[in-house]
Amino acid sequence: MAAPSHEVTQLLRAWTTGDEQALEKLTPLVYAQLRRVARYHMAGQQPGHILQTTALVNEVYLQLVDYGQMNWQDRAHFFAVSAQLMRRILIDFARARSSQKRGGGAPHISLDEAPSVCADTDPNLVALDDALKELSKVDERKSKVVELRFFGGLSVDETAEVLKVSVDTVARDWRLAKIWLVRELSAEGERGA
């Protein structure tokens, strides 16, 4: 069961003022949602992916602790920042894996010596990140809607609250952004083929 939004908001504000007990009370209230969002993202990864759900949540949590002095507005703001961190971690990991696959810093060996077992990384996540960067140049709000909904797991209502727009605007932006991204990712696939 999710904690009431106002309780999370009060704890975030207390944490901002340096109340360490607030952080201790906050952690179990937000951990379940962070884990749910991380599990959703990890479900889309290749089997045998090195980064696991718990590790992703822990990495986000460690980075959030560094944000302790941030002026948290509310629960939705917290999960928006969490979404940005989760996106950054997943993209950085995918890019690092891709770099390693191309030999980034690895000793060169002949093809005969190379093992044939290499877990492929899903290039779709990197392509989505690149497409979102392009979308933000065209329409930053639509890009934020995708980030909050897809990476942050926020509902339409929560996304509207974070962005300070109407629920109808978020629904429209979400629908149009998905169409734009499908078109962009399809074009990218054709260019890469």
Image: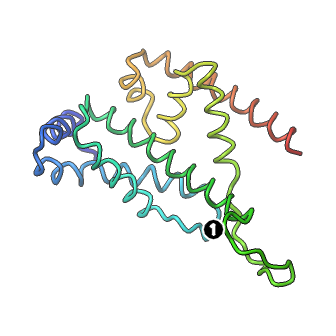
Residue 118 vertical position relative to residue 66 in the rendered view, above or below: below
Q: Picture coordinates of residue 32 (x, y %)?
A: 33, 53
72 sits to left or right of 94: left
Q: Picture coordinates of residue 136 (x, y %)?
A: 59, 25
Q: Mark 1 packing: few (<14 Cα in 10 Å), some, or many (20+)?
A: few
Q: Residue at x 10, y 45 (%)?
A: 19
Q: Residue furthest bottom?
A: 113
Residue 70 lies in quadrant: top left
Residue 50 vertical position relative to residue 56 in the rendered view, above or below: below
| Towards the viewer: 79 or 133 | 133
138 sits to left or right of 62: right
Q: Residue at x 28, y 45 (%)?
A: 2
Q: Residue at x 54, y 52 (%)?
A: 90
Residue 138 lies in quadrant: top right
Q: Residue at x 77, y 74 (%)?
A: 108
72 sits to left or right of 122: left
Label 1 belongs to which residue? 47
Quarter the C terminus occupies: top right
